[in-house]
Structure formats: C-alpha cells, structure tokens
Image (cartoon, helix red, strand yellow):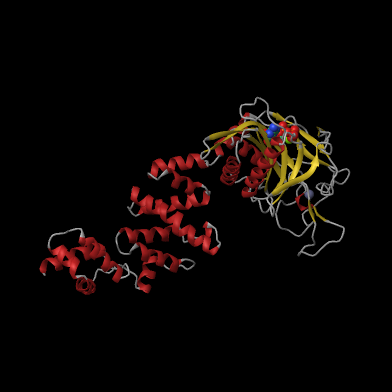
Amino acid sequence: MEYEVVIGLEVHVQLRTASKIFCRCANRFGAEPNALVCAVCLGYPGTLPTLNREAVDQALRLAVALGCEIPSRSVFARKNYFYADLPKGYQISQFDQPLALRGRLALHDAGVEVPIARMHLEEDAGKLLHEAPGGGVLRGSSLVDHNRCGVPLVEIVTDPALRSAAQAQEYLQVLHQVLRYTDTSDANMEEGSLRCDANVSLRRPGAARLGTKVEVKNLNSFRNVARAIEHETHRQALVLDSGAEVQQETRSFDAASGTTRTLRGKEEAHDYRYFPEPDLPPLLVDEDRVRRLRGELPELPWTRWTRFAEQYGLREDLARQLCAQREVADYFEAVVAEGAATGAAGGAWAQNAANWTMTEVLKELNARGEGIESAVEPTRLAALLGMVARAELSQAAAKEVLAAIWGSEEEPSAATRRLGLGQVQDADRLEEWIAEVLAANPGPVEQLAAGEQKVAGFLVGQVMKLSQGRADPKLTRERLLSSVART
Ligand code: ADP
Ligand code: MG
Ligand code: ZN
C-alpha cells in the first residue's frame, strides 16, 4: 500500500544576544558549568524577570524575514512541568498569543512554499549531563548545568505541509541560511543552538483527514532528521499494512541504528497547565518597530542569488551555491569588486571569480578545516586571477601559487617569480620546446604541413605538456605554425 507522508517541524533556535532573556547573565556557549547564573535564572523565590529588548528585536527580525504577521500584542505564559533542568518548575514561553503568525519559507529544489504556523519567544532550560566532564562515568546520578537556563529561544512551527524527508531537510537548510543571514542565531545543531522535532504521519493518498502523528525527538543533524522521517515512514506503513493503527506518541531517534523508539505514549503526555505569566506584562509591538526592523533586514539568500544570476550572468545553481553562506557570497562580491577596480569587470571576470571561490578557495578551506575568514584576501585572489586573465600564469600554475601564498602575506606576483611558475614567453625557451615536440611527432607535423590545421592543437598541447603548462599558448601556436611552415 502506498501512503502519503505528512510532516510538520518544530524548530527551536537560540538567539545571539549578549545576555539572557530575563536576567543579565551572559548568553554564551561553552563556559564552565554553572558559571553563568544568577538568582533570576536559577528561579529563586522573590526574583522577577525583566524582558531583554534585544531578544525581542532579533525574534522580530527573524519573523519579518520569514514573512510572518506580527500581532501588536503577544502574551507570555507559564508552561508548567517538573524536570531537573528547570529550576523554576515552569518555563516562561508563549501559548495562544505568540509573537508571530503565518509566515512562509520557499524551497527552491522542492518547488514548494512551506507555511509557517507560528513563532514564539521563550526561555531555554538547563542541561543535564549524564557523564562527568571529561567523560567519566556517573553511577546512578546526573549533573545539571544551569548556564543554558534563560537563554533566549524562538520556536518556529510549520503547518503539517511537508511531504518528504528531502523537503524537511531542505526546509532546515534554508531556515539555517535565513538565521545566518539575519545574524539571529549561530544555528549550530551540534552545539544545540538549533534543535528540531519532527511530527510524522501517514494517510491514504487523497484522504481528507490527517493520520495520527508521531513526534520524533533527539535529532541532532539535518541528515538525521531525514533519516528519522524515512524510518518513521517505513515503520508506520508496516503498522497500517498490518491493519493496526498508529499510536500517538513521542519517540526518540537513535542515530547509531537509524531507528526510533517509544519515549512516552499519549497517556504520559504532559499537561502543561499553561496560564498567563503574572510577572510580565503583555508584549506590545508597534508598527514603527516592525517597520524599522524590516528596513534593517539584510538582503536575504533568495534575493541575493537571484541578483547574482542576473547581475553577473551566473548559472542559477552556481549563484545559489555562492549564496548558501553569507560570508562566501560577500567574499565572491569582494573579488568581483577588486576586478572592477582594475578594469577587469565583465561576465568572464565574475564567472572566474565564482569558479575560483567555489572550487579552489573552498577546497583549500575544507582541506584546512577553516572558515572563509581565513581565506586568502579578495585583493590577492583578484591579483592572481588578473595574472591568469593576462596570460601571465596558466590555470594550473595559478592553483600552485594560490596554495603557496595561503597563510602568508606574499603577493601572487612575488610567489610566481619565487617559484618560477610564470608563463614562459621567452623565444629561445619556446623554440627549444617546439623543436623537441616537432622532432618527436613527425607524422602530425607532416599532416600539419599538408594543411591539416586541426593537428596544430594537438602539437601545441604537446608543448604545453612538455613545459608543464608554462609555455604561453598563444605565442607557442604562432611560433609552432611558422616553424612548420619553414620546414
Ligand atoms: P500539539 O498540540 O500536539 O503540539 P500542534 O498542532 O501544536 O500539535 O502541532 C505540532 C506540530 O505537529 C506542527 O508542526 C504541526 O504541523 C505538526 N502536525 C500536527 N498534526 C500533524 C499530523 N497529523 N501529521 C504530521 N504533523 C502534524
Ligand atoms: Mg505544539
Ligand atoms: Zn541569570
């Protein structure tokens, strides 16, 4: 039996503020356990929360980027539950009046627009450690780190509108780009600053009602979100095929086996007993504030790659790859601008800059495990590409020069001289190579002499090979043709 898979994602994102959402403790990952705490985020009796304005601004900026509607009034609510990582015994969140509603995110590969149901602001809980710092075994106990208590979070909830694991993965990738472009989160799944739960159900194609959903937690990479959905799809299909019903429950993904297992059933589902937070007034957001934040939005990824394709004449997929990371797109545009400054503007220059950024520069960065901020500066890459454009350096030699100047301050021209990699235009050297190639290839030489022009390419190629790419191809061709004409 074939089923249609229906997926809704709930994504938690830690905002990139300097301090926590309701106190003045630093919002920072990786500090000593319990170093970033105070009476407020530890939930001491008698303390009161004070809302961090910057957290609200960042959440609003994200909401605007996602095309959400922003109600003029939203309300904080207490979400009550008992857990060792939650010192207050409740989480300050939002419930029926969230910060933002009805947004959307376009997925280019899938060709769909994902409706976002809501986005709300809340505080993070602490973190339980089940092994001692450094990896030691804890017997019958766990440790709690409160540094994360009160870190500002937004939760972004989609409609049940995704239809495959691939769509879910693309949604996360594009959302990740938006978070990085708007500078609202590190969005690092490994460090937990982006966390995703997947709700999955199946139904017969064409069925009007949605099937019973299962919520899958503990997904720590984009790939694992897709794996978990694939596994759930398969598991639920077997249940339905057997004539049984899918149980509504929360399951946990086990990355090692690629399977999910029951965490808690419907009966154990939490009843959070939400009620409006008495210690915080409703959050009022006026139109001026939204307008200001909208005006401050940077160019978003989809606008930017569309512009790259048009302005620089790049293929769409290349433009999209360049824009996947804002810093890479910035780097590319800086190389283009350097070219324009030296009069090398034009489609070919931009194309070259794009190719070199996506292949040579990223290859070098990957090999070194570094980010784009460690790359050879755009000025020096542009100087290098200028030498290639003026035929002072072959493509192959330019790659060697790039590797040589990486991590130093050497100019490409100096490195070219130092390494003896420049394009050879010296007549005597060229004639030597040509003579050697002509002597070694009497057959083709005869063909060329008889007027078979296409053999010239082969012979020039042989000279390039002999010279390890350093012979100036244009001069080589001219001299080779006149040599053959003389014989
Ligand atoms: P709950 O009240 O259980 O939290 P919500 O209505 O808040 O459920 O939805 C939570 C998430 O589950 C949303 O992302 C939503 O799109 C998704 N969802 C709801 N129903 C289904 C379903 N039948 N199949 C798949 N996803 C669903
Ligand atoms: Mg929910
Ligand atoms: Zn604090």
Give the x, y percent position of residue 355. Answer: 41, 53
Give the x, y percent position of residue 57. Answer: 65, 39
299 sits left or right of 100 in the view? left
Figure quadrant of residue 122: top right
Looking at the picture, does residue 111 appear above or below residue 318?
Answer: above
**Front-lying residue, 235 or 458:** 235
Q: Is residue 186 visible?
A: no
Single out the residue that lies furthest toward the right: 45
180 sits left or right of 146 in the view? left
Figure quarter occupied by ligand 1: top right
**Front-lying residue, 272 or 164:** 164
Rendered residue at 45%/45% (across/down): 317
**Front-lying residue, 173 or 286:** 173
Q: Quadrant of the N terminus?
A: top right
Looking at the picture, does residue 144 appear above or below residue 91?
Answer: below
Single out the residue that lies furthest toward the left: 486
**Front-lying residue, 311 or 224:** 224
Q: How many marks?
A: 0
Give the x, y percent position of residue 86. Answer: 82, 46
Single out the residue that lies furthest toward the front: 242
Give the x, y percent position of residue 467. Answer: 29, 71
Figure quadrant of residue 229: top right
